[in-house]
Image (cartoon, rainbow, N blue to C red):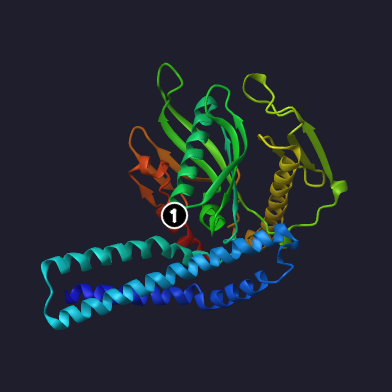
Amino acid sequence: MHELLKKIQNLLQEIESLKERLDLAGKRVQAGEIEKEMQAPDFWNDQAKAREISETYNALKSELDFWESLHKQAEDLFVLLSEQIKSGELQASDREYFETSFEELQKKYLGARISAFFSKKYDDHNALLSIHAGAGGTDAQDWAEMLLRMYLRFCERKGFKAEIIDQSKGTEAGIKSVTIEIHGHYAYGYLKSEAGVHRLVRLSEFNPAHTRETSFALVEVLPVLKSEEEIKIDPKDLKIETSTASGHGGQSVNTTYSAVRIIHIPTGIRVSIQNERSQHQNKEKAMEILQAKLNLLEEERRQKEKQEIRGEFHSAEWGNQIRSYVLHPYKMVKDHRTDYQSTDPNRVLNGDLDDFIEKYLESTISMV
C-alpha cells in the first residue's frame, strides 16, 4: 500500500500545481468582487448585463468549488491511508476501498485538467457553432446531421446547454446547415478546436450500389460576445430583411414575419435566422451572430498580421481540412493537425471528443 500512498501524494501535488496554474487565488478574489457587485440595490436595473455577470460568477464559483473539493478529498484519502498503514490494521476490504477511491479521484482530475489550457481570450465565453454541408449531396447533408448529433452529445457530457437557433433541412435527408448556441463554462475554449472541414469516408446509404463515398462538412465556431465587448455597428451599414418563416410542407412556422436576414453592407457578411420564435427574438440572435462574425474578422486580421510571415495562419474555410472519419474499409478517426487518432469512430461520433480537444490544445501551447 506504500505504492498507492505515493500515487495519492503525487496526485495531490499535481492538483496543487494545477490550482496555481489556474490562478484559483486570483479567481477567488474576482468572485468576491463580483459577489459584492451583485449585492448592490441597482444590480438588476440592466437585466442583460446582470445575467452576464451572474453567469460569470456562477461559473467561477463552480470551478473554485470543484478544485477545493477534489483537493480535500485527495488530502483526506492520503491522511486516512497513512494512518491505516501506521496502525498495521489494513484489511482486504480496506485495500479495495482505497484503490477504488484513488481511481475515482484520478479520473475526476484527468477529466478536469483540460481547463488548464483555457487561458486565451474568449475561452470562458459561450459559443456559437455552425455546421454547413459541403460537396457530396445527400451524403454530405446526412454527414452534417451526424456532426450535429456528435456535438449535442458532447454538450450533454459536459453539462452544457445547447439550443438550435437556426436550421435548414436537407432535400432528402440530413441538414444543409445548422447553428447552435452553447452555454457553459469554457464552451468556446472546448469547441474552438472543432473549426474547420470534417471529412467522412463510408459506404453510402443513399445510392443503390452502396459505393464508398467521401463527404465534407464545414464547422464554424465563434465566441458569444459580452455586452462590453460588442463592436459598435452603424445602423446605416445594415440591410434587414424579413419574411414568413417556412416550415415543413410549405406551412408557415407562425403567422408573423419571423424569418430575419441581416446583411452588413461594408463586409458583405450575411446572417439568416429562421426559428419558431418572434421576429424580435430572431433579430436579436442574428445581431448576436453578426457581432461574433465581425469580431472574428477583426481577430483574424490581427492574427494574420502576426503570423503571415511564418505561414501559420489558417481560418475555418473549405481548404482547411482538420479531421477525417473513416468508417470503410477500416475504422479510424484522425486529426490532421496533431496526428492523434482513434480506432473507435462510434465512440467519437457519440460525443467523446476530449482526447482530440486536449491534444489540439497541447499543440497550440507548443506553437506559442
- Image x and y of residue 324, in percent: 44, 42
318 in relation to 22, above or below = above
Q: Is residue 366 above or below residue 146?
A: below
Q: Residue at x 45, y 44 (%)?
A: 153
For the N terminus, give its image quadrant: bottom left
The quarter of the picture where residue 52 lies is: bottom right
Horizontal placement of 137 versus 345: left or right? right
Residue 111 quadrant? bottom left
Task: Return the x and y of residue 165 as percentages of the image width and height.
Answer: 63, 40
Counting the numbered discs, the total is 1
Looking at the picture, tell me which residue is in the foreground, 184 or 337. 184
Name the foreground residue: 120 vs 212.
120
- Look at 47% across and 52% down and name the residue there: 159
**255 lies above or below 268:** above
Q: Give residue 23's position: percent from left, percent from top.
A: 51, 75
Q: Where's the C terminus, which quadrant?
A: bottom right
Residue at the limit of the structure toward the top, as seen here: 208
Residue extending farthest right: 236
Residue 61 appears in the picture as rendered? yes
Note whether residue 366 is visible.
Answer: no
User: Where residue 348 sits: x, y (%)?
Assistant: 40, 44
Residue at 22% from the left image edge and 68% from the top image edge: 98
Seen from this angle, which residue lies furthest front?
41
- Secondary structure, mark 1, is loop
Question: 10 Å neighbourhood of mark 1: few (<14), some, or many (≥20)?
Answer: some
The residue under label 1 is 338
Q: Is residue 44 above or below residue 75?
A: above
Q: Amino acid at mark 1?
A: Thr
Residue at the spot x=16%, y=83% of the render?
86
